Protein backbone atom coordinates (compact mmCIF):
# COMPACT_ATOMS: atom_id res chain seq x y z
CA UNK A 1 0.00 0.00 0.00
CA UNK A 2 1.44 3.32 -1.11
CA UNK A 3 1.65 5.95 1.59
CA UNK A 4 3.05 9.46 1.43
CA UNK A 5 2.88 11.44 4.66
CA UNK A 6 3.74 15.12 4.62
CA UNK A 7 4.90 17.05 7.66
CA UNK A 8 6.85 20.11 8.70
CA UNK A 9 4.44 22.88 7.81
CA UNK A 10 3.69 25.77 10.09
CA UNK A 11 3.53 29.51 10.54
CA UNK A 12 6.63 31.47 9.62
CA UNK A 13 7.42 35.14 9.09
CA UNK A 14 8.27 36.44 5.66
CA UNK A 15 11.96 35.93 5.00
CA UNK A 16 12.07 32.85 7.18
CA UNK A 17 12.75 29.21 6.39
CA UNK A 18 10.94 25.92 6.73
CA UNK A 19 11.67 22.34 5.72
CA UNK A 20 8.91 19.98 4.69
CA UNK A 21 9.25 16.20 4.83
CA UNK A 22 7.46 13.46 2.92
CA UNK A 23 7.80 9.96 4.35
CA UNK A 24 7.16 7.31 1.71
CA UNK A 25 6.25 3.67 2.22
CA UNK A 26 5.06 0.87 -0.02
CA UNK A 27 7.11 2.36 -2.86
CA UNK A 28 10.26 1.36 -4.72
CA UNK A 29 11.74 4.66 -3.63
CA UNK A 30 14.92 4.71 -5.71
CA UNK A 31 13.09 4.28 -9.02
CA UNK A 32 10.33 6.79 -8.33
CA UNK A 33 10.02 10.45 -9.26
CA UNK A 34 8.60 12.70 -6.55
CA UNK A 35 7.21 16.20 -6.60
CA UNK A 36 5.85 18.83 -4.30
CA UNK A 37 2.68 20.60 -5.37
CA UNK A 38 0.88 23.40 -3.54
CA UNK A 39 -2.63 24.81 -3.41
CA UNK A 40 -2.83 28.45 -2.43
CA UNK A 41 -5.88 29.94 -0.70
CA UNK A 42 -8.62 30.87 -3.16
CA UNK A 43 -7.06 28.94 -6.02
CA UNK A 44 -8.83 26.06 -7.67
CA UNK A 45 -5.80 24.17 -8.85
CA UNK A 46 -2.62 22.87 -7.35
CA UNK A 47 0.63 24.08 -8.84
CA UNK A 48 3.79 22.10 -9.33
CA UNK A 49 6.56 23.50 -7.14
CA UNK A 50 9.53 21.15 -7.41
CA UNK A 51 10.40 17.73 -8.80
CA UNK A 52 13.08 15.23 -7.79
CA UNK A 53 13.62 12.68 -10.53
CA UNK A 54 14.91 9.17 -9.96
CA UNK A 55 18.01 9.96 -12.00
CA UNK A 56 19.01 12.74 -9.60
CA UNK A 57 17.76 15.69 -11.62
CA UNK A 58 15.67 18.37 -9.97
CA UNK A 59 13.36 20.98 -11.42
CA UNK A 60 11.61 24.01 -9.98
CA UNK A 61 8.87 26.37 -10.95
CA UNK A 62 10.21 29.85 -11.64
CA UNK A 63 8.76 31.54 -8.58
CA UNK A 64 10.68 29.31 -6.15
CA UNK A 65 13.92 28.88 -8.13
CA UNK A 66 16.85 29.78 -5.92
CA UNK A 67 14.75 29.77 -2.76
CA UNK A 68 13.53 26.17 -2.52
CA UNK A 69 15.55 22.97 -2.65
CA UNK A 70 14.06 19.53 -3.16
CA UNK A 71 16.06 16.52 -2.05
CA UNK A 72 15.59 12.83 -1.42
CA UNK A 73 17.09 10.43 1.10
CA UNK A 74 16.88 6.83 -0.06
CA UNK A 75 18.07 5.52 3.30
CA UNK A 76 15.07 7.13 5.00
CA UNK A 77 12.62 6.89 2.08
CA UNK A 78 11.95 10.57 2.58
CA UNK A 79 11.67 13.54 0.26
CA UNK A 80 12.37 17.03 1.57
CA UNK A 81 11.54 20.54 0.48
CA UNK A 82 13.79 23.16 2.03
CA UNK A 83 12.19 26.56 1.72
CA UNK A 84 13.98 29.81 2.42
CA UNK A 85 13.33 33.51 1.86
CA UNK A 86 9.66 32.72 2.20
CA UNK A 87 7.14 35.24 0.95
CA UNK A 88 3.44 35.62 1.64
CA UNK A 89 2.68 34.15 -1.79
CA UNK A 90 4.20 30.85 -0.65
CA UNK A 91 1.27 30.37 1.71
CA UNK A 92 -0.45 27.15 0.65
CA UNK A 93 -1.14 23.54 1.47
CA UNK A 94 1.83 21.56 0.20
CA UNK A 95 1.42 18.03 -1.14
CA UNK A 96 3.96 15.35 -1.92
CA UNK A 97 3.14 12.94 -4.74
CA UNK A 98 4.75 10.49 -7.09
CA UNK A 99 4.94 11.83 -10.61
CA UNK A 100 5.59 10.61 -14.13
CA UNK A 101 8.68 11.63 -16.07
CA UNK A 102 6.61 14.61 -17.22
CA UNK A 103 5.70 15.75 -13.71
CA UNK A 104 2.12 14.52 -13.80
CA UNK A 105 0.77 13.23 -10.47
CA UNK A 106 0.26 9.50 -10.01
CA UNK A 107 -1.41 9.71 -6.63
CA UNK A 108 -4.61 11.19 -5.30
CA UNK A 109 -4.11 14.20 -3.06
CA UNK A 110 -3.53 13.57 0.60
CA UNK A 111 -4.03 16.01 3.46
CA UNK A 112 -0.82 17.84 2.77
CA UNK A 113 0.87 20.20 5.19
CA UNK A 114 -0.10 23.83 5.68
CA UNK A 115 2.50 26.55 5.26
CA UNK A 116 1.49 30.04 6.29
CA UNK A 117 3.82 32.96 5.73
CA UNK A 118 3.00 36.12 7.64
CA UNK A 119 4.19 39.68 7.09
Image (cartoon, grey):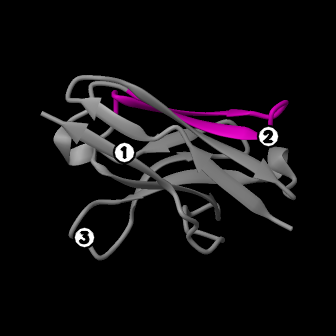
Task: From the viewer's perspective, tell me whether residue 15 is left or right of residue 81.
Answer: left
User: Mark 1, mark 3: which one is toward the viewer?
Assistant: 1
Q: Are marks 2 and 1 in contact (CB under 8 Å)?
A: no
The picture places residue 18, in percent across and down from the top left corner, at: 42, 29
Q: Which mark is residue 100?
A: none
* Front in this rendered view, residue 25 or 29: 25
Q: Give the CA separation, mark 3 to mark 2.
A: 31 Å
Taken as a whole, is the magenta stretch helix, strand or loop?
A: strand
Precedes in sequence: disc 2 or disc 1: 2
Magenta range: 65-83
Q: Give the CA separation, mark 1 to mark 3.
A: 15 Å
Helix, strand or loop at disc 1?
A: strand
Q: Sort mark 2 into few (<14), some (14-19) or many (20+) by Cα contacts within 10 Å.
A: some
Residue at left offset 27%, top offset 25%: 85
Q: Quadrant of residue 68?
A: top left
Considering the image in quadrants, where does the C terminus appear?
top left
Determine which residue is flagged by label 3: 43
Residue at left offset 76%, top offset 60%: 3
Helix, strand or loop at disc 2?
A: loop
Helix, strand or loop at disc 3?
A: loop
Determine which residue is flagged by label 2: 77
Task: From the viewer's perspective, tell me whether residue 83 is left or right of residue 63.
Answer: right
Precedes in sequence: disc 3 or disc 2: 3
Q: Quadrant of residue 65?
A: top left
Residue 1 in the image: above or below residue 74: below
* Front in this rendered view, residue 13 or 50: 13
Determine which residue is flagged by label 1: 115
Q: Are marks 3 and 2 in contact (CB under 8 Å)?
A: no
Residue 99 in the image: above or below residue 91: below
Considering the image in quadrants, where does the N terminus appear?
bottom right
Q: Quadrant of residue 118?
A: top left
The picture places residue 96, in percent across and down from the top left corner, at: 57, 54
Amino acid sequence: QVQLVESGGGLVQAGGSLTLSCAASGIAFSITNFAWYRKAPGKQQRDLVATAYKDGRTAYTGSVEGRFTISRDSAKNTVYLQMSSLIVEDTAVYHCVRVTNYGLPLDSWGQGTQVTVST
